[in-house]
Image: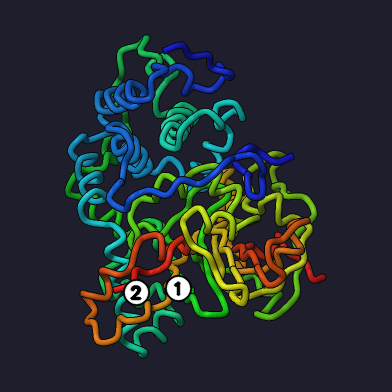
């Protein structure tokens, strides 16, 4: 089973509303929520795959009704408790906050530029040999599920499960989210851009030559 | 505001219901625990409100339009080329540039969350993060383009890039007719944010 975040191809969401380029945030608390999320990430208690998984673990009801930055804040709160950084009582305002032993890692204003500039590259050396080359046909695995952890994080969307495509390019070897989101190691492996004809994915493609390209790890793919 | 949390097991349900108060409560708690420096939050916000935004990407596109060697290098290894221009870091660690032509129009989405090339385009617009865009653009890109006022010729194929990994895509829109002779600065004014996501075209001069 997939989670509610996996919405590619879904019907019923209505129209898309363009907006001016100079609109960056839509409420005063949005930039604060963004900054808070980045600053807590700098504490080093989780990686980006863990944080994506935390948002995906919101109940479908919460995921659907929360706005973008509400999902971020909910994910941060859940991770802070899960990782023992704050207690439920502190979060509820029912206990006086105690100072944290993690405080030496607190992001300082003068460190922000460096932390943002470094980012979090995901390419790693790997012993896993690429099985495919650009031009090769591939088929994605039938179930859009994490094969290591039941119900775990994965980056194969349901709409592209069990689909035939062709490799456009090899991106190198990258951290595998299905492992890294569950603290099971980075498990780097070859990552490919794979193109799928729209007619392979949809019953009513708009145009015979349209395609969708996804970045997919080697363990998501088989030879056709 | 009434609030019925559907899932009381999630710790986030312990925070105040109103989003603004929820953020404030979390910031106050983490500041008291010594885990947040409010000045660092101000610095992060200033970065994305004033220093990093789509004018960065527009500069890259304008140079690609002006300089064939730069364009070739950009298509070959965008990460290295834009880093030389000072554009790198969080959510732009692995960049790929894709070029629109008469035959092919590229559009970028992240159906699973909202991955986006921050160092080149800044914070994603609201619609990019919307359920409607995430759900629909992979299935009916031409209908979505129509909502942006864009209609493609029948001979142009659409390629939608779903950003499912840590690779971020920058669309190089087609250079508009009538822009011959313009310098890089003037050209960059024609490059809209949406044209670098693929939901728009570059402006006519």
Colour scheme = rainbow
Which residue is identified by label 1?
B97
Chain letter of disc 1? Answer: B
Chain of residue at mark 2: B
Quadrant that contains the N terminus of chain A: top right
- Disc 2 residue crowd, few under 14, some 14–19, many 20+, Cα 10 Å: many
The residue under label 2 is B61
Query: In the displayed structure, does residue A194 sit left or right of residue B63?
Result: right
Residue A8 position (above or below residue B74): above
Query: Which element type, helix, strand or loop, lies under badge 1?
Result: strand
x then y, percent, for residue A204: 75, 57
- Residue A200: percent from the left, percent from the top? 76, 63
Left or right placement of residue B193 versus residue B145 in this view? left
Would residue A122 be seen by someone viewing this image from the given angle?
A: no
Above or below, A120 against A126 in this view is above
Give the number of callouts. 2
The residue that appears at 46% across and 33% down in the rendered structure is A67
- Where residue B11 sits: x, y (%)? 49, 22
Identify the element where label 2 is drawn.
helix
């Amino acid at each position: 089973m997939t989670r509610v975040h996996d919405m590619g191809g879904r019907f019923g969401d209505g129209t898309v509303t363009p907006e001016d380029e100079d609109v960056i945030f839509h409420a005063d608390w949005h930039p604060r929520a963004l900054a808070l999320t980045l600053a807590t990430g700098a504490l080093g208690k989780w990686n980006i795959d863990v944080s994506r998984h935390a948002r995906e673990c919101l109940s479908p009801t919460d995921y659907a009704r929360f706005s973008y930055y509400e999902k971020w804040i909910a994910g941060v709160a859940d991770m802070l408790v899960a990782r023992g950084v704050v207690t439920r009582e502190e979060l509820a305002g029912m206990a006086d906050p105690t100072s944290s032993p993690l405080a030496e890692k607190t992001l300082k204003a003068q460190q922000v530029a460096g932390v943002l500039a470094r980012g979090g590259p995901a390419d790693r050396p790997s012993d896993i040999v690429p099985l495919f080359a650009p031009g090769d046909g591939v088929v994605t695995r039938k179930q859009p599920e994490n094969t290591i952890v039941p119900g775990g994080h994965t980056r194969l969307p349901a709409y592209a499960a069990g689909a035939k495509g062709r490799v456009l390019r090899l991106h190198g070897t990258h951290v595998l989210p299905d492992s890294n989101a569950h603290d099971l190691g980075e498990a780097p492996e070859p990552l490919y851009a794979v193109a799928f004809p729209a007619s392979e994915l949809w019953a009513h493609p708009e145009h015979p030559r349209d395609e969708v390209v996804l970045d997919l790890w080697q363990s998501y793919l088989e030879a056709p | 505001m009434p609030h019925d949390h559907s899932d009381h097991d999630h710790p986030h349900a312990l925070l105040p219901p109103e989003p603004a108060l929820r953020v404030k409560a979390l910031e106050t708690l983490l500041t008291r625990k010594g885990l947040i420096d409010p000045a660092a939050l101000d610095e992060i916000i200033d970065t994305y409100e004033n220093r990093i935004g789509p004018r960065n990407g527009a500069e890259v596109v304008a140079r690609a339009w002006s300089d064939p060697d730069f364009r070739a290098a950009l298509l070959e290894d965008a990460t290295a080329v834009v880093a030389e221009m000072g554009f790198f870091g969080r959510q732009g660690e692995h960049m790929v540039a894709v070029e629109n032509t008469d035959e092919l129009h590229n559009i970028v989405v992240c159906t699973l969350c909202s991955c986006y090339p921050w160092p080149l385009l800044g914070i994603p617009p609201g619609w990019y993060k919307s359920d409607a865009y995430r759900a629909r653009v992979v299935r009916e890109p031409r209908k979505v383009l129509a909502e942006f006022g864009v209609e493609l010729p029948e001979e142009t194929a659409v390629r939608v890039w779903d950003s499912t990994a840590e690779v971020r895509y920058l669309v190089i829109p087609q250079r508009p007719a009538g822009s011959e002779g313009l310098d890089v600065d003037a050209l960059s004014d024609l490059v809209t944010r949406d044209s670098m996501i693929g939901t728009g075209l570059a402006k006519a001069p």
